[in-house]
Image (tube, rainbow, N blue to C red):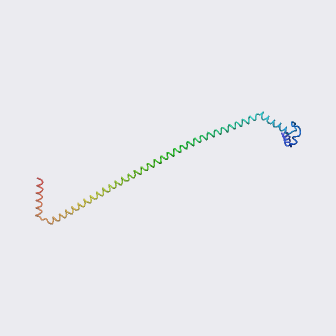
Amino acid sequence: MKRLILPVLAALSATPAAAASGPFFSLGNTDFVVLLGFLLFIAVLIYFKVPGMLAGLLDKRAEGIQDELDEARQLREEAQTLLASYERKQREVQAQADRIIAHAKQESELAAEQAKAEIAQSITRRLAAAESQIASAEAAAIREVRDRAASVAIAAARSVVAEQMTPASAGKLIDDAIADVGAKLH
């Protein structure tokens, strides 16, 4: 192998002036030798179908890249669909949350109104109960004052009658009372 490489290297390292001396189709001309080597290299590549293999490999690679691009497009479309779905769901959830908040506000306002009405009714009932208790206490106080006044009047009348009453006048009062009861019964 070294034997083949060294003459080729020596021929390649020759100066252009030395290569141009002599006829072109001579093995002494390095340009002709390089041309023959290049043509032989191309012929070997074509014989072993290297360009077809390279084209096949490049086609296979291009198909692989195209498949990856198609898959990436499909994944992107799926991601966009999924994103749109999540955005739609997010809007629906937001709308539902807004409805829940509005409903809760309405319920709290209604509950506040009801609480105010119940407090007003409770105050009215308590005022009525207090007025009733005051009226009852007032009536009881009036009764007690009358009862006390009657008791005092009876006691005063008893003491006045007892002081002014003699046994003769007491007998006469008893006889008058008996006659009066007898007249009313017949």
In-image side of 126 versus 186 (left or right): right
**Residue lying farthest to the right in this orientation:** 22
- In which quarter of the view is residue 69 placed? top right
Residue situated in front as seen by the camera: 39 or 160: 39
- Horizontal and vertical percent for residue 125? 34, 53
Above or below, 5 against 124 in this view is above
In-image side of 135 versus 185 (left or right): right
**Residue lying farthest to the top in this orientation:** 47
- In which quarter of the view is residue 16 placed? top right
- In which quarter of the view is residue 126 placed? bottom left
In-image side of 147 versus 110 (left or right): left
Q: Give the tally of numbered discs.
A: 0
Residue situated in front as seen by the camera: 131 or 106: 106
Above or below, 86 against 119 in this view is above
In the picture, the quarter occupied by the N terminus is top right
- Horizontal and vertical percent for residue 165? 13, 65
Above or below, 184 against 12 in this view is below
- Horizontal and vertical percent for residue 75? 61, 40
